Amino acid sequence: MKVTTRKVTTRLSVSLLSLTAAMAAGAPALAQDRQEEPDQPVVLDEVIVLATKRPETLFDVPVAVTAYSSEQLQAAQVRDVRDLQIVAPTLVVNSSAGSTQTIFTIRGNGTPGQNTGLEQSVGVFIDGVYRGRPGAALGDLSDVSQIEVLRGPQGTLFGRNTSGGVVSVQTQPPAFIPGAQLESSFGDYDYRQVHATVTGPVIGDVLAGRLSVSSQERDGYIEDIGTGDTYNDRSRWAVKGQLLWDISPAATLRLIVDHSETDEVCCVAVPIFYGPTASAMSALGGVLRSGTAGTYGGVAGVFVDNSVYDVALNPASQAVDDSSEDEGVSGQLDWNLGSTDLTVIAARRTYKTLPTIDADYSSLDLLSQTNGQDITEGSLEVRLSSADPDARLDWLVGAFLFSQDIFADQDLRYGTQFRAYLEAITPRVTVAPGVTVPVLTRLEQATGRPIGTFGAAGVAVNDDYDYESRSAALFGQATWNATERLSITGGLRYSREEKSADYRIQSLDPLSQIQFAGPLAPFAALKSLQYFPAVNPFSTDFKDDDLSGTVSAAWEVNDGVNLFARYARGYKSGGFNLSRTAAQTTPGNPVADPDRVVFDPETVDALEAGAKLRFWSGRAQVNANVFYQTLENYQTNGFDGTGFRIVNAGGLDSRGLEWDYRIQLTDTLVLDGGGTLQDAEYTDFVNATPTAAQIVAGQTVQDLSGRTPNFVSDVLVSGGITWSAPLNASLGLKANLNYLYRSDYMTAQDLDPLSLQEGYVLMNASLGLGALDGAWTGEIWVRNLTDERIANIVFDTPFQTGSQSAYMEAPRTVGVTLRRKF
């Protein structure tokens, strides 16, 4: 397969001379370590990307895409997909109660997690294989060769659930030249990381192999003030084996087998506001953090400093666990058939997890929750494309099949103190002069139940869901090279989605089954405690199809300027609210009308135009574009303190400016970075989940029309500064600083004022010494240099009306890394 490199020479254009000084002064870029002739300036190689499913230079491809090399990722200390934000400011990654609750957002478009039925708007592909759920895409980034972040809808070529964009990860393939590398890191919080890889021929020049293993351990950074235990640690390992078979000069087959596991005590949140139920918690012996008395939304309480990473839980009776297993096998066949190239990618993957959280986030034994997922995915992609990059018409056609089976198991258990807590937050009633009893006791007497029935310890609700999804698509794209410098591209994709789900929701909470009518009408105030009404088993299905597409034009003005414009339509399938609260929070009886748990597909139309500039004799590369996109039926997921509610917002509009650059400022100094200026707002969202204060006031919905969605900052700017220089004939010194500025944003979908995260600057830095030939290096590093305290997500504390908690990012960490190549 040939690489399209139409006119990628980067001679200095007279018209760009005036831009050189300005861009060199303010914009970051990255350079490869290299040695040139003494009288020749160091220049930047043009990056090859797979944004159009075939190798093309970044300069040529008419797509808003940024690529990050393994050297750049290593310098910025990017260890998993969540760390990508420090080099890719257009990508926002938020993770809360474990890996399954991760949210990827590009241009304000990102589907909230916390529900098995939701799929991401930003598709993650690793070695060409689609990962259908975020938990299966967050392992260690070892052996990475390059990561591409494609912004805006990518549905034509990448397919399902890429209405927001794509994160495409390519790992190092086997090599026929023998080699090995060992990397070890040590740091505070007892951080230990080991990564080893070996590659070389297995059978002469026909079969090559590669084996990689990694392990990562770190203590938690959130401490229990009662027990001294720590939470939110790291404990994971992975192994990956590959074979590369050179079948013939025209055909290769790459096979990959991988397995990874995590066994982590994660995840817990810190309190930020104690509402009116705090007194009941304290009366029962609960340990509360100190704070400042105040009022929020008309509710009196205590504000707690969330920059102090202390909590009070009870791990002896309520374990916290975020263990998982992820494994898969895939194969990619590339075969040149003469005038065409054939590519076939087949994969099968499984992902299993059963995370457990202390759902009351307190030292009392009130609530524990598990949200298990057992996922099996299969995919097959077949592409046929033209093989001549100089042809007047380049084309590509293909088909994609995807299957996904999920068994989701969720349950919530009442603890030994839950009944006492309910009695503390509900009134007492008079049964005789001077004699009062808890209202729950009186209700038990009125219904003939034993005292202590309501709120008794044990499983309150257990539910499971069998979910099946089948997807098929046909797609094609063609580029007409009208002239040597002008090309026009068009593409279409037809998608067909079929989904079904079986709901089995078993409520074992007798209080939730009471009908407060007739003689029991005086107890109607207890309806607010009926968290788990009975729902008969039911099934539902969903079918949909869609035709989406793209059209773009690229004009290579000269060897250093390429202008492009693009329109794209994206599509993300609808689905089911796979949650026990689905039956409660949607009107109607799901047994009679199971469509009540269905949410609609979302679509996005995007326009973008930009320029790709190469100047300063090949030492500067700048890419910039503007965009405008509109979403219809935007899928949102809100939490109200007891459950999640999926609704389709009427619309979401976003517009902005994006840029990225690499500049070889001197032979020893490299700058790289990028940024986004954006404006995003709901155009019509009248049925959003209310805030905690609004719930207390009796509201059931709120209108967020005209407001900016959560996780969206107006300004995101990142950059890297890399300085490297020889000390003598064999040793060199290298220093790196990466930074990310992010303006303030809301973290809660209900845009609760308490969820505001103020703007911050996050910095990672390193200083290394090593051999100039790369045989060995050693470096000291620091992550989150200024020890910024960043709230990932702020949410309503479950079953504690008016209270708020927050998941926090890790504080500053320091360590050392040693690398050895053989």
Image (cartoon, rainbow, N blue to C red):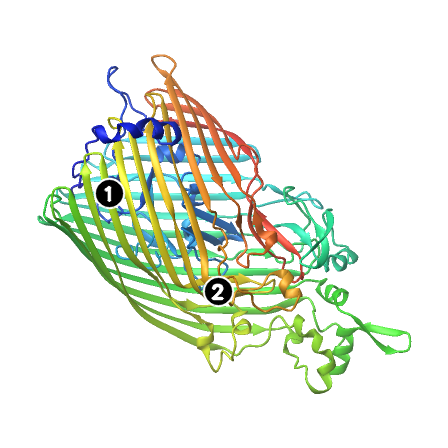
Residue furthest to the top: 728
In the image, residue 471 lies at what x, y percent? 31, 65
**Residue 47 visible:** no
In the image, residue 660 lies at what x, y percent? 35, 38
Q: Tell me the residue at 63%/57% (across/down).
A: 797
Q: Of residues 484 and 378, which is closer to you in this image?
A: 484
Q: Is residue 459 left or right of residue 773?
A: right
Q: Amino acid at mark 2?
A: Phe
Q: Is residue 29 left or right of residue 525?
A: left
Q: Of residues 224 and 276, which is closer to you in this image?
A: 276
Q: Is residue 149 above or below residue 543?
A: above
User: Which of the 4 image quadrants contains residue 367?
Assistant: bottom right
Q: Of helix, strand and loop, which one carries label 2?
A: loop
**In this figure, which residue is indicated by the disc labeled 1?**
563
User: Which of the 4 image quadrants contains residue 76?
Assistant: top left
Quarter of the image with the N terminus is top left
C-beta proximity under 8 Å, tags 1 and 2: no
**In this figure, which residue is indicated by the disc labeled 2?**
685
**Residue 64 visible:** yes
Q: Is residue 8 above or below residue 590?
A: above
Q: Tell me the residue at 74%/65% (across/down).
A: 425
User: For residue 647, which numbered disc appears in the image?
Assistant: none
In the image, residue 452 lies at what x, y percent? 74, 72
Residue furthest to the right: 433
Q: Of helix, strand and loop, which one carries label 1?
A: strand
Q: How many marks are shown on the rendered structure?
A: 2
